Amino acid sequence: MTDIDLTAFLADGVTADDVPELGPLMAARGIVGTFISLFRGSDAEVLLRLLVLREIGQESEAPRWTPETLRRRFAYLDPVKLETVLKRLRDHDLLAFADDGLYHLSDLGRNAVAALGMLLQFSAEEDAELGFLTAQLAGLSATGNITPEALSHLLSKLNDLTWHFEEAIASGSEFRIVTARSRLKANGRWIERGTTLLRELLADPEVDFEIARVAQRIGLAQSRLARVDAAFQRALNKIETQRVTLGGSGISSSDVAAWLRQQDASRLAELVVGALDASPAPALLAGGHELLDRAEAALSGQNQQTALDTSLPAAENTPPSIAPEHEDLRLLEHFGARLGKLQTAVPLQQMIGGGGFAPASYRLSLLALLADGEDASPADGPIGAFMRLPLTVSFSDRLIEVNEDEIALITAGEVCPTLSPSPAPDAEQ
């Protein structure tokens, strides 16, 4: 790669030596030049170079090719275009032509093929960026070449995911929350593998301070992501309480919104035709009798007398004191008493059923609140006592059929009593 003159791109009086961030890039001009030559040109030219380079690199048993073998292998390509591609790959040290007249990949070419292979593998998966970054860290950690820069890429991705999930919750949109929750689930295994890598990294007493600092920040970001699922559940429970059912059809407003989202623009335009009409002018709604009544009242002066009458009302005795209204927590207390008597794990649908959909939905929201832990509860009162129950509530993403007591489907889960530690033996015994 020839010398690069950056004078035209730098501010007046600044040289390339004054920008330390350019140092690593200038030192790796060979590798940078390799990728520049590989990806320079039209899309068709780039795809053709990648095709030839990958096919040559995939032959591991016989890594050397004669020109005639290459022409037979790429018989579906134009011979002139193939020779042009081979010449460009040779000129930029991606492909080597040995003294024995055989083609083979250079070291730079093989590294480029390996990097592209990893990127193509992850591109087929949902949210592949986190998987690629985690795999890259695993490789660097195995070879002992992990750097703060590589860790910063992972930290940036985790913070971006956290921002995306928090924005979905703040939007209050059921569809955005469900989509974000599925994205969190898809990234779950990469978050777990990243946690394992960080534990191994921080367990080394000789780890660099900057690496340890970034690793600790990654741990905090992963902890925030681990708590997001509970926030998703709370938001969905809140939306559930606000969902409207269309008569006795069993169709909710969420079902209607989901159906509308599946329609194209032309179908939505057909639905709107005739459904939205301009409202008539209010004056046209008034008949002769209504107009006569209004005119009579205006002419008699009743409106002016009413407006001018500002006298205070007559004095009255103070009404007897009425007890202030308070929230009815009988269902909460009764449900808490039932939970307090649990001795073994009970499926979720058995605990919340009874009394119809509204009481069951209320009990499910209480269990979701209980799953947040005692730290989210007030200090005193019935709700605080409920939150301190020695119980563990677990939810899953699976739905099971109920088909009774106005409940069709429910999230699978269970309520399990927490085993309290056995009391310490008396010191006098």
Image: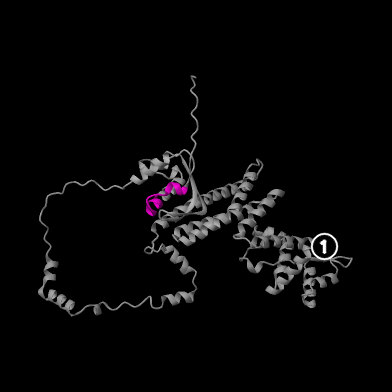
Front one among 418 and 383: 418
Q: In which quarter of the image is residue 296?
A: bottom left
Q: Name the residue under label 1.
A: 63
Q: Is residue 203 left or right of residue 334?
A: right
Name the spot of residue 17 as percent of width and height, x first: 67, 60
Residue drawn at 61 percent across, 46 percent down: 212
Q: In this view, does 319 lie to the left or right of 239?
A: left
The answer to whether residue 221 of the structure is visible from this angle is: yes
Name the spot of residue 71 as percent of width and height, x first: 82, 73
Front one among 170 and 4: 170
Q: Give the range drawn in magenta.
A: 348-362
Decide whether residue 101 is among the magenta residues: no
Seen as rendered, the residue at the extreme front is 404
Q: Is residue 173 above or below residue 371?
A: below
Front one among 340 and 387: 340
Q: Is residue 137 above or below residue 280?
A: above
Image quarter hosting the N terminus: bottom right
The chief SS type of the magenta part is helix
Q: Is mark 1 on a helix, strand or loop?
A: loop
Q: In which quarter of the image is residue 242?
A: bottom left
- The kind of residue tagged 1 is Pro
